[in-house]
Image: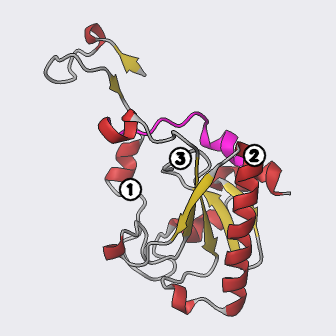
Amino acid sequence: MLLGMHDQAGAGSPDNFERLWTPHRMAYIKGENKPTSTGPGDGCPFDAIPKMSDEEGLIVARGETVYAVLNLYPYNSGHLMVVPYRHVADYAELQPAELVELGQFTQKSLGVLRKASGAQGFNVGMNLGQVAGAGIAAHLHQHVVPRWGGDTNFMPVVGQTKVLPQLLRDTRQLLADAWT
């Protein structure tokens, strides 16, 4: 919600900037629900999500060894992750069936995102280990981030804010429908 100068009482020192408040991001910044140890059953969200309904867990599709889920803190609309059910931290530890299905789900994700959202490009990858930037280093997950021409503008560059045009539940439904 953009607030004018007159609506910013208590927001700090008055200035000429408009503000887009995103209080939901504070949970991510504070690391809420982030596991504190490295073993299965440590509160890992990637272990908990498959036990939820697809809608509740934002699951787009389920396979035999992996599942596709929307990122709760997306870089772009449609940002999803392909996650093994098995609690495993390193790509080198994946079993052959997990490797194959992870690749197949990643490939399928690209097609689904192109079909459902008209994505023009993608960032695909993993951050293995905390020092490499993994938010949840104990459970491997591959990011699939759709991109469009002009999707980086002044908001993330100057305002350090990402504007997402669709609610996560609506995005999940759109991608789940396109998956089949």
Q: Which mark is residue 32?
A: 1
CA distance separating discs 1 and 2: 31 Å
Query: Would you place residue 9 above or below residue 84 in this image?
Result: above
Query: Would you place residue 98 above or below residue 50 in this image?
Result: below
Q: Amino acid at mark 2?
A: Ala
Nearest to the eye among marks 1 and 2: give it: 2
Q: Position of residue 62 (x, y in %)?
A: 75, 67
Point out the stretch of residues depicted in magenta.
Answer: 159-173
Q: Quadrant of the C terminus?
A: bottom right
Mark 1 residue element: loop
Residue 152 is left or right of residue 51, and the answer is: left
Spot the residue most to the left: 13
- Label 2 near label 1: C-beta < 8 Å? no
Residue 160 falls inside the magenta stretch: yes
Q: Amino acid at mark 1?
A: Glu
CA distance separating discs 1 and 3: 21 Å
Q: Quadrant of residue 106?
A: bottom right
Q: Is residue 22 visible?
A: no
Spot the residue most to the top: 6
Q: Position of residue 158 (x, y in %)?
A: 30, 36
Spot the residue most to the right: 180
Residue drawn at (25%, 20%) of the image:
17
Nearest to the eye among marks 1 and 3: give it: 3
Residue 153 falls inside the magenta stretch: no
Looking at marks 1 and 3 on the same chain, the residue that comes earlier in the sequence is marked by 1
Residue under label 3: 76
